[in-house]
Image: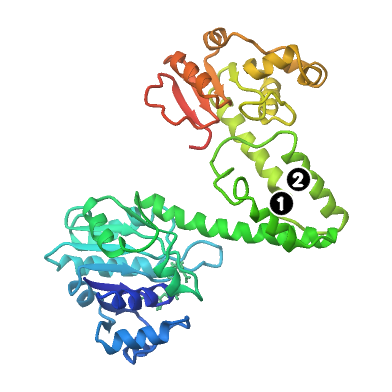
Amino acid sequence: MNISIFGLGYVGAVSLACLARDGHKVIGVDIDPVKLALIQDGKSPVIEEGMPELMADVVSRQLVQISQDVEASLLKTELSFICVGTPSQANGSQDQTAVLRLAEQLGKALAKKTSYHTIVFRSTLLPGTVEGVLKTLLEQHSGKKDGVDFDICFQPEFLREGSSIKDYDNPPFTIVGANSERAHGVMQQMFGHLPGEYKKTDVKTAETVKYFCNIFHALKITFANEVARLCDGLAVDPFKVMDLVCADKQLNISTAYLKPGFAFGGSCLPKDLRAMQYVAKQADIEIPMLGHVLASNAVHLQQACQKILATGQRKIGMVGLSFKSGTDDLRESPLVDLAEFLIGKGKLLNIFDPEVSISKLIGANKKYIEESIPHIGDLMTTDIDALLADNPVIVLGLNDKALVADVCAKLTADHTLIDLVHLKDISMLKARYIGLCW
Ligand SMILES: NC(=O)c1ccc[n+]([C@@H]2O[C@H](COP(=O)([O-])OP(=O)(O)OC[C@H]3O[C@@H](n4cnc5c(N)ncnc54)[C@H](O)[C@@H]3O)[C@@H](O)[C@H]2O)c1
């Protein structure tokens, strides 16, 4: 294909060299004449393993042209990649000056184009930027319509400086956010050969994923480093610890615990976090990230409290009380905290939890309910039908499949359902639906 690349920093230069290597004819555009001169001489504008050889090769085979002319470059090509910088401003906000200016120029160039064109944004952009301001600029300045005369896509870039070419050839996946099958057709033709699945999504999700991949990496590094500081204080080898932490592919290095849901609780997680926080305090070790995990969990609980209060109803039915489905353990259950908060706000509660109801009569939890939370034990019912009939607001905190199906089938248009577990399918639900943060 004939491709134009706008912005020849790390992302643009590596893309230019790799696309040319793969047999495409590429025009590289930048406002920096030094970068253009380097490429013209067959030299790489960025220091990257393999780039000097690759750039020399593709330039010598005349697969690459360079230009400062946005319009001519767009008109000569069918596909454009936008790779200009989007640095931080002093206040942390994203500086979009380059991409906004470029979108205006691209729009003016598109006005003169008589055939279909695909514009792919690869710069990291705040969610909503492409379909908001960039699409508007392109349409305004071209007088044409996205999805009709041209298509816009967002394809997050996952290369890492230092191993860019390897990462370009071995991405974990290829994510393309687009609104048209025509654009996906072009992109699959370009990148379908790469290892890693080609994933279609909407534009805003693609923009967002890039942020949370990077933030997750930052979080993982910080986790390992805070663990190391704590281990240092405890005279334990952090490498032995983290090697073993990483050896667990079921719970640790896996998708476990990575689905949005309700606050965590139970007899282990909060207790063990607090114990390590105390170790840190005693040894003067700063662990700002781990030290704020419980505070973040409390904020999440408050989110549920606020959503329930916002219904303005006094009578509330809670389905679930234990800290997770399939157990009767009430120790540090966030649903118990939620119930206590609502009682404190003068709400009238009914609570249904089949596991807890049994343990209210027998088992280890009987004593806990009678001695520690008798005020909550008294609000429990074993009659789900009565709970649904008596309460206009139902808080779903249990994820038992059969119970969820039964509750959902019995809810009426007079109910409001506050979903803390993320129901998979709400299409048949008659009640007003409020998700925790979805
Ligand atoms: N560097 C990385 O490892 C990496 C990885 C993934 C995503 N990203 C994202 O990709 C984008 C580019 O990153 P980078 O590190 O390659 O940036 P960079 O700063 O190295 O390069 C950006 C280039 O854009 C050029 N430019 C600015 N305005 C222009 C215009 N109007 N027309 C043409 N060129 C123009 C600049 O002269 C510069 O050469 C950023 O949004 C970044 O967040 C970077």
In the image, residue 266 sits, relative to residue 244, either above or below, namely above
Residue located beneath label 2 in the image: 273
Quadrant of the rendered image holding ligand 1: bottom left
Please give the name of the residue rendered at 36% of the width and 84% of the height, measured from the top-left corner: 55
Considering the image in quadrants, where does the N terminus appear?
Answer: bottom left
Please give the name of the residue rendered at 63% of the width and 34% of the height, measured from the top-left corner: 302
Label number found at residue 50: none
Please give the name of the residue rendered at 78% of the width and 40% of the height, measured from the top-left corner: 271
Residue 129 position within the rendered picture, expressed as x and y whole percent measured from the top left:
38, 56
Measure the alpha-carbon separation of dots 1 and 2.
8 Å
* Number of residues whose C-alpha sits closer than 10 Å to that of mark 1, classed few (under 14), some (14–19) or many (20 or more): some
Residue 141 position within the rendered picture, expressed as x and y whole percent measured from the top left:
23, 63
Q: Quadrant of residue 158?
A: bottom left
Please give the name of the residue rendered at 77% of the width and 43% of the height, measured from the top-left corner: 272
Left or right of 159: which side holds 137? Answer: left
Residue 428 position within the rendered picture, expressed as x and y whole percent measured from the top left:
37, 22
Left or right of 232: which side holds 182? Answer: left
Residue 398 position within the rendered picture, expressed as x and y whole percent measured from the top left:
58, 25
Left or right of 97: which side holds 138? Answer: left
Of helix, strand and loop, which one carries label 1? helix
Sequence-wise, the earlier of marks 1 and 2 is 2
Outermost residue on the left side: it is 114
Q: Amino acid at mark 2?
A: Leu
Is ligand 1 closer than 8 angstroms to the Cβ of mark 2?
no
Q: Amino acid at mark 1?
A: Leu
Of 74 and 196, the residue lying toward us: 196
Residue located beneath label 1 in the image: 290
Q: Quadrant of residue 114?
A: bottom left
* Number of residues whose C-alpha sits closer than 10 Å to that of mark 2, classed few (under 14), some (14–19) or many (20 or more): some
Of helix, strand and loop, which one carries label 2? helix
Q: Quadrant of residue 191?
A: bottom left
